[in-house]
Amino acid sequence: MDPPLHRLCEFASPEDFEVEALADARRKRLEFRPRQAISRQGEAVTDVFLLVDGWVTASMEVDFGHRQMIKIHLPGDMLGLPSIALTRAAETLTTLTDAIVDVIPLEALGRLFRTAPRLAFTLFVSTQQERVMLMDHLAAVGQTSAIQRMCTLLLHVHRRLKLLDPDAGAVVDWPLSQEHMAQGTGLTAIHVNRTLQALGRKGLIAREGKRIRLLDVPRLEEISGMPERVFVREPRWLTALGNELTA
Amino acid sequence: MDPPLHRLCEFASPEDFEVEALADARRKRLEFRPRQAISRQGEAVTDVFLLVDGWVTASMEVDFGHRQMIKIHLPGDMLGLPSIALTRAAETLTTLTDAIVDVIPLEALGRLFRTAPRLAFTLFVSTQQERVMLMDHLAAVGQTSAIQRMCTLLLHVHRRLKLLDPDAGAVVDWPLSQEHMAQGTGLTAIHVNRTLQALGRKGLIAREGKRIRLLDVPRLEEISGMPERVFVREPRWLTALGNELTA
DNA sequence: CGGAAATTTGAAATCGCTCAATGATAGTGG
DNA sequence: CCACTATCATTGAGCGATTTCAAATTTCCG
């Protein structure tokens, strides 16, 4: 199975040699069952990972037992990048589902900056995009109510799944436990439960076993208060870099 | 005045040509008075900025009137980078003090990836470092109490100032209002006030006009619960990239 | 089928918020 | 230099969103 590259093609369509350069950087493939650790907070950092398939969470333990979920990773995401700035990993990567990841050693990542400068710049922009998502996450946790945070979380996942599969409907296969959602939103699992019930009572969502159906996306967006981000596509300052290179 | 480059020299000492390449990318210099906007949320994005001198905040307005402070920028920081992934800026950059910034057009930034690959990789790592700081920020806001968040904020600024000036003592010139601290920590200005008083009563800090003196850093660290990050220095996978290049 | 994990419910406690008002400080222009 | 004004800091009282604790119920996995 090839890893989905939509996260990297989002800003500029890569040339064949760039796709190859990235493929060369991937050294081996690992497979995991649900709830396994891909890497752990505190460990030495030697590689990053490209998520080929499955859902993975990045989380940090803080303050004895409290855990903050930083990010829900979906196929196509790069995992473990933030920790390359550290001697010991900041984040624990844990699978939510069956998952496949490709391992990219840091040396190979660095080499991309020499062999494929525009791909490297694209990767750079992609990391800035991650930063924006993290900023939005912080803003939601810091400034909004429990109901708003839950709506924001539901919409965030829904939107990202739609990018992966434009035909995806309003029903989401939901591998996150209420404890996970609590760790992501900065709430208690108990309060997550009550908030989900409130959303159900209002007719905004329906929970069907491990699925969640979004019944009224516009209303959820209204409550959430967080706007959908519009990311750049093929900006001149990025595409021009490729032209200069091939010229 | 030359911009401090410590944020970029942190991971690998740059060659002369790399420093020059960066200098070439800086096109003009702007000066601001306190409380002026350098750029605003929602505006088109054409440049990033290198902060030469002064303090600047990056913040986002959410949900009608609520504002989240994302980052306190100090000299040497790159400003506005996250928004290069967007068509409209996510963040408003506002000066806290008199400030000087150098403007770097996005075309010039991109060109660095071709002319100075290792510098570009260093910039990439530096952005991952920002991501780690943002993750820590999120973890503090999401999972810790008001007192812990205030300790974390005080220590964060103190540590960063020490990197700028190793001789800096425990007294910090503090241009942040309590409203700013509230927007940074996800608390109310009123509760920030009471929390600062509580820290004063415990003998952990002393407020002297617009200065704050940290009286007991170890105890503050203990309460904060967030460990100080150790960032990589001259890792082989980064320095080796330079050798290959010059070879 | 059995046991662990996840969800749900209720009641009581609390941390932090809201509202409203007063006091201090600093920058501005006359 | 002082009056004027806006911003910032402080205080009190009451409230409320969310947490905590404890226990029952359901779901899921092996």
Image (cartoon, coloured by chain):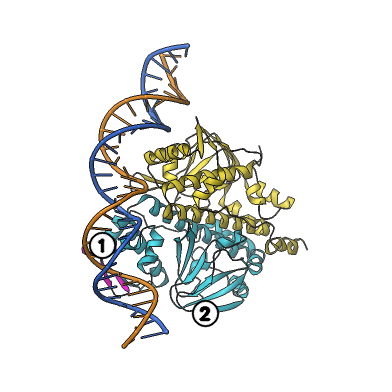
Chain colours: A cyan, B yellow, C orange, D blue
Residue B99 screen position, x and y as percent = 55, 36
| In-front residue for pair B247/B133 | B133
Residue B205 screen position, x and y as percent = 51, 38
> Relative to A222, is A6 above or below?
below
| In-front residue for pair A44/A25 | A44
Q: Is residue B235 left or right of residue B56?
A: right
Check chain identity for marks 1 and 2: say if they share one: yes
Q: Which numbered dot is residue B121?
A: none
| Residues packed near mark 2 inside 10 Å, few (<14), some (14 to 19) or many (20 plus) | some
Residue found 57% across the figure and 61% down from its top: A83
Residue found 39% across the figure and 73% down from its top: A165
| In-front residue for pair D2/A157 | D2
Residue A227: quadrant of the picture: bottom left
Q: Is residue B109 left or right of residue B152?
A: right
Queried whether the magenta region covers residue A68, the answer comes back as: no
Residue A82: quadrant of the picture: bottom right
How many numbered badges does the structure rendering display? 2
Q: Amino acid at mark 1?
A: Leu
Residue found 42% across the figure and 56% down from its top: A137
Helix, strand or loop at disc 1?
helix
- Whether residue B32 is visible to the viewer of this picture, yes or no, is yes
Q: Which numbered dot is residue A199?
A: 1
Q: Which numbered dot is residue A31?
A: 2
Contact, CB < 8 Å: mark 1 with mark 2?
Answer: no
Queried whether the magenta region covers residue A209, the answer comes back as: yes
Query: Which residues, given as a range, are shown in magenta?
Result: A197-217
Q: Report, in whole angstroms, how far the alpha carbon at label 1 lies from the one at label 2.
A: 36 Å
- Whether residue A217 is visible to the viewer of this picture, yes or no, is no
Q: Amino acid at mark 2?
A: Glu
Disc 1: host chain: A
Helix, strand or loop at disc 2?
strand
